[in-house]
């Protein structure tokens, strides 16, 4: 019997899942429910649970944070996440943490509960088999007559029609296994020649799978430990594939050793430092700084989720010097985008921002001085920022500094500071529970009443009203 805990802050949704799912048919039993992550952890302290089904978007503690904590405290618990169809970035992060599957709430609304539980039950069975002792598991592993394996990975955020793989003539007689959600493996009966590879590619195109899957042909696996190979493969799927996959290319060939190459990644401190560097505007006017930032990303290979976090935050600084904010937002790559698409987007954004700076006809040296002033403002919004101090730092008179600032940035010095502070306040109001007086202080307003008056003049709402509106979204 698989014991299930359901966690969702929406009581009606939670009760609906518990009442409507055919748990008994799949040897499952709901032993508890919780309306947030903290209550779920409290339940787990006293009750045994095998499967945790959790919503991702919850107050107090998100589903992702709950999964991380449960994984640390109770590593044998399986995770399944509840989500809406548009939450693919969160789904990818959940799968990276260790979720074995996800349930789109539309599936429940469409009365596809039996199909959902059948899929989850099968994934648990496979996970149990994978945890068997090595000797017992090896007896069930397919034996590779050749020294290579084929790996099929779902491209993008959606699901691929892996059932069509059995229709490939080149796969006839081979064992195809799903080892993780969206990742299948096959072991050729003999070494594939160039002609075999070309035939497989044609077959994939004929079935329309070339846009649904990425195929890895891994050679040199004969003396490789299968467990370690799978770990390296999963790491490659989550990290390296994001950087190495190219538009229009769905077949890649590697050695087993190639998959084992380490990548540094980013610590929280390194993520913060790189976020600050991209939030800075020097990379707009200095080509060398731009290339160094790109090289640092390609060297460390941070996760796609870290990059999305980085550029979402940094973009707030970019759009402050551009009235073309909507254009930049629309072009930002979505879930499933490749690193090559991100670099294309960055190049386009940099071109737009450089064009705005170039309209002022000032020298690059002056433009860099103004960008330094903008960077200082963005990093010191809570302080008393003096016009004269920044003009002196730029080695300009106060009047000439004001003229250069307005023509390069598009707003007066004081308007820019006001707008930056209000935008920062909006972010803090929407994403934190800090009291309004504290947010006012962090945005450079010592007086809460004055802050509220300026905020209403700029947004049409009081800070408290703005927070209430965002809480409803």
Image: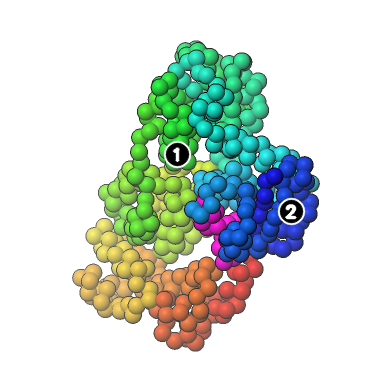
Question: Which residue is at 50% across, 14% downward?
Answer: 145
Does 62 appear in magenta? yes
Observer-nearest residue: 24 or 364? 24
Which image quadrant for residue 37? bottom right
Q: Which quarter of the rendered picture does the C terminus lie within?
A: bottom right
Q: Is residue 209 left or right of residue 442?
A: right
Q: Secondary structure at mark 1?
A: helix
Does 217 appear in magenta? no
Q: Secondary structure at mark 2?
A: helix
Residue 464 percent coordinates (x, y)? 57, 79
Residue 59 percent coordinates (x, y)? 59, 65
Residue 406 percent coordinates (x, y)? 36, 69
Question: Which residue is at 58% across, 60% downward?
Answer: 45
Highlighted magenta segment, given as a residue range: 53-71
Vertically, is 223 above or below 303?
above
Q: Return the mark for residue 235.
A: 1
Q: Return the mark for residue 396.
A: none
Question: Which residue is at 63% across, 30% downward?
Answer: 162
Where does label 2 land, which residue? 17
Spatial CA distance of label 1 from label 2 is 33 Å
Residue 205 percent coordinates (x, y)? 59, 24
């Amino acid at each position: 019997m698989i014991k299930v805990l359901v966690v969702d802050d929406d009581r009606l949704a939670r009760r609906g899942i518990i009442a409507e799912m055919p748990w008994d048919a799949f040897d499952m039993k709901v032993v508890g429910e919780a309306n947030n992550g903290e209550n779920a952890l409290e339940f787990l302290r006293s009750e045994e649970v095998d499967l945790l089904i959790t919503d991702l978007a919850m107050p107090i503690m998100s589903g992702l944070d709950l999964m991380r904590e449960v994984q640390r405290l109770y590593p044998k618990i399986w995770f399944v996440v509840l989500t809406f169809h548009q939450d693919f970035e969160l789904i990818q992060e959940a799968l990276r943490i260790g979720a074995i599957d996800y349930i789109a709430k539309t599936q429940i609304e469409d009365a596809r509960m039996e199909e959902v539980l059948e899929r989850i039950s099968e994934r648990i069975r496979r996970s149990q088999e994978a945890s068997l002792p090595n000797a017992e598991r090896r007896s069930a592993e397919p034996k590779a007559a050749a020294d290579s394996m084929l790996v099929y990975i779902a491209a993008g955020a959606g699901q691929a029609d892996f059932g069509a793989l059995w229709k490939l003539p080149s796969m006839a007689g081979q064992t195809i296994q799903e080892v993780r959600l969206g990742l299948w493996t096959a072991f050729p009966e003999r070494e594939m020649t160039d002609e075999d590879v070309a035939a497989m590619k044609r077959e994939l195109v004929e079935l329309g799978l070339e846009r649904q899957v990425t195929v890895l042909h891994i050679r040199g696996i004969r003396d490789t430990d299968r467990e370690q190979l799978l770990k390296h493969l999963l790491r490659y799927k989550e990290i390296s594939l994001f950087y190495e996959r190219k538009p229009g290319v769905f077949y890649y060939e590697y050695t087993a050793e190639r998959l084992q190459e380490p990548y540094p990644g980013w610590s929280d401190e390194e993520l913060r430092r790189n976020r600050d560097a991209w939030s800075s505007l020097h990379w707009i006017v200095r080509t060398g700084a731009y290339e160094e930032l790109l090289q640092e990303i390609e060297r460390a290979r941070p996760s796609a989720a870290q990059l999305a976090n980085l550029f979402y935050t940094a973009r707030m600084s970019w759009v402050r010097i551009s009235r073309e904010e909507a254009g930049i937002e629309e072009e930002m790559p979505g879930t499933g985008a490749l690193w090559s698409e991100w670099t294309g987007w960055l190049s386009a954004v940099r071109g737009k921002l450089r064009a705005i700076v170039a309209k002022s006809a000032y020298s690059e040296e002056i433009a860099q001085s103004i960008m330094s002033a903008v960077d200082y403002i963005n990093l010191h919004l809570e302080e008393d920022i003096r016009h004269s101090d920044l003009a002196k730092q730029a080695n300009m008179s106060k009047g000439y500094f004001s003229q250069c600032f307005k023509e390069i940035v598009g707003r007066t010095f004081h308007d820019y500071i006001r707008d930056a502070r209000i935008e920062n306040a909006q972010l803090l109001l929407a994403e934190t529970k800090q009291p309004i007086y504290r947010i006012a202080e962090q945005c450079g307003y010592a007086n809460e009443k004055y802050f509220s008056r300026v905020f209403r003049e700029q947004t049409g709402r009081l800070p408290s009203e703005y927070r209430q509106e965002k809480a409803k979204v």
